[in-house]
Image: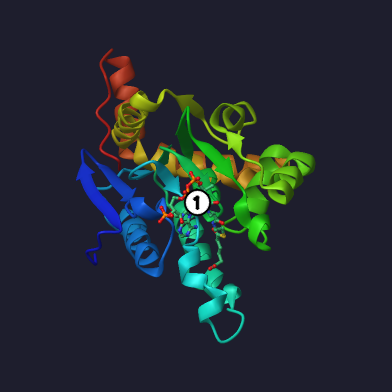
Amino acid sequence: MAESNTVLVSMEAGVLTLTLHRPDKLNAFNEEMHRALRAGFERAHEDTGVRAVLLTGAGRGFSAGQDLGDRDPRKADGPPDLGRTIEAFYNPLIRLVRSLEKPVVCAVNGVAAGAGANLAFACDITLAARSARFIQAFSKIGLVPDSGGTFTLNRLLGEQRAKALTMTAEPLDATTAAEWGLIWKVVDDEALMAEATALAARLAAGPTKGLGLTKRAIQAASANDLDAQLDLERDFQREAGSSADYAEGVAAFLEKRTPEFSGR
Ligand code: T3D
């Protein structure tokens, strides 16, 4: 994986921790940070030793979305092709997060704006510091929400709240984001990293195959009718039932001991 200071990478007990690291810019995305983050998620896909990912940000922000310094119209010949940058960077990132058959925990340590907010919402289990806030900043600069924001907000909040948040770009505090179901929970600022790390470690020690299938099943549900989802559950249960972790889980229950899941 290419070394970059823009994303700090560490691995412990099956948890790959990816820390966005451009604190002076509130971890806004430039191309280098995009490449480094993508490399981190590609490693998570390929490396069987990685059994959960923890995503967070360095400094007082989680991510302020696209680095607008790289979009200065005063230094450009004409309008940029933002469709190209979405296709090249933001869409692959969201697809990597959603298709990873391992849990992705997100610890939102501070403000999350634009693509930064929608990246946080795309993760599987998102915790936020009580002081964090989420801003659909796109409309402030004449853009539309990206990074899956229109998909996620509409499904989780319904049209009224999705339209109000995106059209007004009003900040949403972390407590309300949790009450509305956009994130899992709010944690006191000083406790955030300990709680998110413990959660990621717990998931990394879990039945990785079953957790990955669970993620796929939940994500498939919004596009399926009940019959299709029941069929999918049957197929996934067949697959989970043939895993070593299922055999271990049942044996451990019968032997009244804690299971030791291998992830297989
Ligand atoms: O372009 C494409 O490829 C299309 C894709 C677009 C995806 C997107 O994400 S579009 C949305 C881009 N993001 C924004 O519009 C958010 C811009 N930032 C803000 O509105 C505010 O900074 C925040 C509300 C996030 C935080 O406000 P505050 O008051 O806490 O901090 P600040 O003072 O504004 O920012 C601190 C520093 O970070 C500051 O630098 P300085 O003055 O100390 O040297 C600020 O310029 C810098 N910063 C914050 N956000 C960005 C940024 N620099 C570059 N790009 C940013 N997005």
Image position, residue 172 (x, y; %): 61, 36
User: Split into 4 quadrants, where in the image is the N terminus?
Assistant: bottom left
Instruction: Say left or right for 35 vs 180.
Output: left
User: Split into 4 quadrants, where in the image is the C terminus?
Assistant: top left
Image position, residue 132 (x, y; %): 49, 35
Please name the residue shown 24% across and 28% down the image: 260
Disc 1 CB within 8 Å of nearest ligand 1 atom: yes
Quarter holding residue 96: bottom left
Image position, residue 187 (x, y; %): 44, 24
Instruction: Say left or right for 247 vs 97.
Output: left
Q: Does any portion of residue 228 appear in the rendered image?
A: no
Is residue 34 depicted above or below 174 in this figure? below
Instruction: Say left or right for 4 vs 196.
Output: left
Is residue 206 depicted above or below 8 in this figure? above
Please name the residue shown 40% across and 55% down the image: 25
State the residue in front, 235 or 139.
Answer: 139
Residue sitting at the far front: 74
Residue sitting at the far right: 160
Colouring scheme applied when the structure was drawn: rainbow
Q: Amino acid at mark 1?
A: Gly
Quarter holding residue 103: top left
Q: Which residue is mark 1?
A: 116
